[in-house]
Image (cartoon, helix red, strand yellow):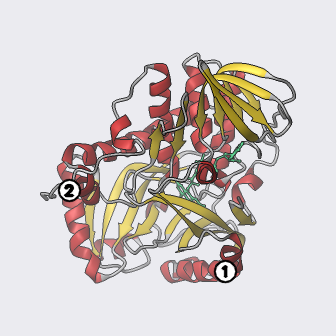
């Protein structure tokens, strides 16, 4: 599957990343994790921390899949609003999902501080603005709901927004100090590097070709002709997992992002907050440690890579225009990197984790969704708990065939 095309910011920030060998012998382990993106690296990191004899394989490099295309915004608010979560899954589970995302942002910070490779985790506030006047009522209701359940949200009217930013919008939710930004490529490499130091065996350029189940576990055969025998397997193979096992809840689209050249100052941009909006698809914007602006969005409903890539140049121009409209005081902006990527989400807005029919001894960890790093953190935690403890408090909410529990929302 062609996951991404273009010129990429993050791999360029870390050209001398650690490298790992291709598998060149038959091996045994307790758990094999397939996929060294965010979901797989976090899973392998957690399993290794728990003392589980783990092997991690990837057919590309560590972080060489969708994780290199990620713009690296980490947020407690999601594509699926808290109101919508409660509406779909009931009050207890809907609120629980938001607690999980809020905790995951903080946990990524905690894990980042344990790594030898600095993943540039910087705590940030977020401005979530109304794209049009019609969105203000729903935004106010969402703010009340966030407050009701103790999430750190402020409501800003048009005047408050203009005092802090160089643009005018009709209203916004401001989430203070609870979100963050990260360099996802360094994060994934940092996780694998630290776990490798602690005994994780890592093989890149090693593709899983086929597998065979037996009574005690699973045997995986790689493209080099070698066998990995494991008690359990975790498939954290990202959007490509859909080629192996299609999930009716999964949706594959295309999205676009761009990074400017470094700039000297950010006038009209309060605290270099993360920014996104109520429109669907939405724009999402952040700054980087080396003073660039990264902006993503303008999603298209296609998973065809040729169609996606044909639009890249135009999308880059449009993203640049959107930036110039929001930040006229910054002056002339120039794009240095621009990329397009496949993007996976789910119809019901939650990531998917757990067992699936016809895959004994296996778990799937699929952090699909716009808040993918946060979701990868959550699914890797659930899958590790399932393997190490035999259960997880959140397995039902996030399992593949989950129950909807439609419920009215009381603001
Ligand atoms: C343009 C763009 C912007 C984004 N912005 C954000 C953002 O701001 N914040 C956010 O949280 N998320 C964002 N995302 C989403 C985020 O990138 C993804 O959620 C995340 O990277 C998915 O990680 P993953 O581990 O599931 O997949 P991947 O990173 O793709 O990892 C899966 C790995 O599995 C390997 N693999 C697959 N099949 C096999 C096989 N048969 N054998 C061996 N290895 C295999 C692949 O090579 C790959 O490395 C964005 C995505 C895109 C495209």
The picture places residue 10, in percent across and down from the top left corner, at 70, 54
Task: Identify the disc placed on residue 311.
Answer: 1
* Up-down relation of residue 247 to residue 317 (above or below): above
- Badge 1 element: loop
Q: Quadrant of the C terminus?
A: bottom left
> Within 8 Å of ligand 1, the CB of disc 1?
no
Task: Tell me how far mark 1 sits from mark 2, CA to CA.
Answer: 38 Å
Residue closest to the eye, 159 or 16: 16
Image quarter of residue 26: top right
Choose between 202 and 395: the one closer to the eye: 395
Quick one: label 2, few (<14), some, or many (20+) residues within 10 Å? many
Query: Tag 2, which secondary structure?
Result: helix
Q: Residues within 10 Å of mark 1 (few under 14, many from 20)?
A: few
In this picture, is 345 found above or below 334? above
Q: Position of residue 214 (x, y in %)?
A: 63, 23
Residue shown at the point (77%, 55%) measured from the top left: 12
As drawn, is 83 to the left or to the right of 309? Answer: left
Q: Residue at x 39, y 75 (%)?
A: 279
Quadrant of res 315: bottom right
Which residue does the numbered mark 2 point to in the structure image?
Answer: 145
Number of the label disc, if any, that sits on residue 16 = none
């Amino acid at each position: 599957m062609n996951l991404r095309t273009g010129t990429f910011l993050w791999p360029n920030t870390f050209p001398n990343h650690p490298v790992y060998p291709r598998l060149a012998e038959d091996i045994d382990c307790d758990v094999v994790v397939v996929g060294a993106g965010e979901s797989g690296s976090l899973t392998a990191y957690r399993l290794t921390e728990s003392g589980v004899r783990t092997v991690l394989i990837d057919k590309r490099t560590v972080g060489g899949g969708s994780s290199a295309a990620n713009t690296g915004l980490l947020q407690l608010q999601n594509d699926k609003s808290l109101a919508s979560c409660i509406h779909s899954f009931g009050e207890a589970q809907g609120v629980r999902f938001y607690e999980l995302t809020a905790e995951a942002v903080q946990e990524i910070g905690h894990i980042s501080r344990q790594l030898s490779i600095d993943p540039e985790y910087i705590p940030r506030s977020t401005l979530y603005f109304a794209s049009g006047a019609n969105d203000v009522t729903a935004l106010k209701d969402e703010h009340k709901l966030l407050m009701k359940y103790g999430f750190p949200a402020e409501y800003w009217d048009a005047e408050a927004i203009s005092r802090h930013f160089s643009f005018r919008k009709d209203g916004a939710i401001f989430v203070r100090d609870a979100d963050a930004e990260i360099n996802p490529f360094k994060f994934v490499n940092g996780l694998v590097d630290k776990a490798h130091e602690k005994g994780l065996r890592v093989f890149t350029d090693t593709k899983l070709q086929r597998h065979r189940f037996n009574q005690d576990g699973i045997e995986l055969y790689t493209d080099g002709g070698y066998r990995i025998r494991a008690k359990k397997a975790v498939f954290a193979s990202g959007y490509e997992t859909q080629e192996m096992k299609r999930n009716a809840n999964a949706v594959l689209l295309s999205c676009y992002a761009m990074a400017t050249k470094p700039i000297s100052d950010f006038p009209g941009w309060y605290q270099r907050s993360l920014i996104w909006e109520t429109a669907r698809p939405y724009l999402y914007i952040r700054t980087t440690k080396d003073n660039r602006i990264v902006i993503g969005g303008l999603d298209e409903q296609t998973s065809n890579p040729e169609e996606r890539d044909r639009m890249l140049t135009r999308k880059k121009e449009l993203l640049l225009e959107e930036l110039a409209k929001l930040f006229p005081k910054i002056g002339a902006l120039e794009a240095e990197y621009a990329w397009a990527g496949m993007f996976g989400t789910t119809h019901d807005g939650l990531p998917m984790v757990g067992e699936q029919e016809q895959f004994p001894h296996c778990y799937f960890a699929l952090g699909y969704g716009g808040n993918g790093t946060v979701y990868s953190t959550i699914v890797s935690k659930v899958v590790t708990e399932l393997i190490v403890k035999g259960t997880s408090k959140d397995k039902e909410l996030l399992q593949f065939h989950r129950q909807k529990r439609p419920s009215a929302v009381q603001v």
